[in-house]
Amino acid sequence: MNLKPDIHLYKKAIEISELIKKKELSVRDVVNYFLQKIYQKDGSIKAFLYICEKELDEQIEQIQKGVNNGDFGNSYLVGVPIAVKDIIATKGIRTTCASRILENWIPPYDATVIRKIKELGIPIIGKTNLDEFAMGSSTENSAFFPTRNPYDLSRVPGGSSGGSAAAVGSGQVLISLGTDTGGSIRQPASFCGIVGLCPTYGRVSRFGLVAFASSLDRIGPMTLYTEDCAALLYHIAGYDKYDSTSSSVPVPNYLEEIRKMWSDVESGKKVNFVAGLPKEFFVDEVDTRIKDVIYSSVRKLEEIGFRIEEISLPTVKYAVPIYYIIAPAEASSNLARYDGVKYGLRSAEADNVFSMYKKTRTQGFGDEVKRRIVLGTFVLSSGYYDAYYLKAQKAITLLKQDFQKAFEKVDFILGPVSPELPFKLGEKSQDPIKMYLSDIFTIPSSLAGLPGISTCVGFVPEDGAKLPVGLQTIGKPFDETGILFVSLCLEKIIPR
Ligand code: GLN
């Protein structure tokens, strides 16, 4: 007789982890369960670039030993496998950035988030697909293959963390890590019907995250449920001496905090928060079906006590152009290191050092990455630096002031994550500007360094599929607790 609990009855990673700690399930039971899911589903979704079959045995054994010894008492997620975007360095495991130039790169060290995850007994089940070097919004820029949307295989999962989003959205894992520079956690989370949180800049160490635009890059959790998101963020956040931009602001226990706040709501206490709807986020260009879903979610928040105000963020109309100066500028500098000398691809066809540089970079980088390097080199070049880069920096200051002003009146800013539903593969891949406009609502808070979360709040029927819609909540600096609470409220009041 099998008295073990059925894993599929437990939807949250934190619940499954409890069962492991109580020894009602073994780490192997759980990891095997999710491996089977991957084998069943990933043939069509293609979320993974690498599945850690070889590495898992040792991880499982070590973690189980720890569990048996009563270690990991402080881990909410022990034993529950995580998928990691393949731009985060994993010692001994290939980290490609979905680029030919790093196709065979095996990092000699772990990123800080990976070290933490290992210390908490969270097994790494695989590395997920992305747009090359995280540049893109559809995962079609992967040098290897595109990932598909779990709700409609003819559509994109969003990007650049499309693999991490699709892996969770299709139930192959419950938790994953993504990265967000201009929307790459939030937009794919929205497209795949999951929760994705981009923390305040500095909240999570970037050490071991392969750099795209260092002043904007962030690592964050992607999960099916808000509570798992809170637990995972709690586990990865905090100061790190290896990242000089990481913050020493204390890390609250997000999970405990939001649970307490929600239990107050349940016991009849009215929520006492004000949320702002920026009129710039509800313009004609946004699909009306998305607007309808967002407005109806906002009304439900009102019913539990949120007060809603219209606000304005006048500078957000410049956010996309600002971003496409700053991000490529930093990328052009960060990507200069891939020259065939120290690591990664080296072209075999070159006969001198200059042609080696040129051929390596020509063969190793895809079109979008090359476009950004050229753009970035141009805006930083002498004579243009002041006109573009410096001006864009000044414009960021104005954008930050818009947000500061808004946050004097409101606690949160709400709006859509994306102006449109998940689009078809190939629909925008030939038109970079169209693709760039996908991130029109996520880029503003990226430039301002603010935390944002995407929560699935509904579905829209289209071509026989139902396509998810994400609501974005932007918070004050370091108010991850607040935006997680809004996300939890949405999850509780909007039945899925
Ligand atoms: N889609 C945006 C870009 O292409 C954002 C990417 C990201 O956040 N990594 O740059």
Image (cartoon, helix red, strand yellow):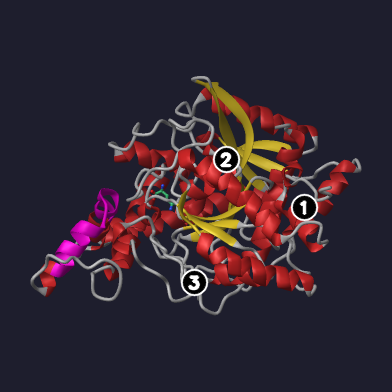
Q: State the extent of the magenta-drawn residues as a range.
A: 356-372
Asked whether disc 3 touches disc 1, contact meaning CB atoms under 8 Å apart, the reply is no
* Residue 11 picture location, percent across and down: 72, 44
> What is the crowding at mark 2: few (fewer than 14 residues within 10 Å), some, or many (at least 20)?
many
Q: Which residue is mark 3?
A: 207
Q: Hey, what amino acid is under mark 3?
A: Phe
Task: Give the answer, above or below, for where 340 lies relative to 476.
Answer: below
**Residue 371 on the magenta span:** yes
Q: Does residue 157 appear anywhere in the picture?
A: no
Kindly tell me whether mark 3's CB lies below 8 Å from ligand 1.
no
Q: Which residue is mark 2?
A: 170
Residues at marks 2 and 3, CA–CA distance in whole angstroms: 29 Å
Q: Hey, what amino acid is under mark 1?
A: Glu
* Residue 43 picture location, percent across and down: 47, 41
Query: Is residue 165 found left or right of 142 in the rendered image?
Result: right
Q: Hey, what amino acid is under mark 2?
A: Ser
The quarter of the displayed image where residue 339 is located: bottom left
Task: Give the answer, above or below, for where 447 lies relative to 285.
Answer: below
Most common SS among magenta residues: helix
Quarter containing the C terminus: top right
Point out which mark residue 156 bears. Answer: none
The residue at the far right in this view is: 267
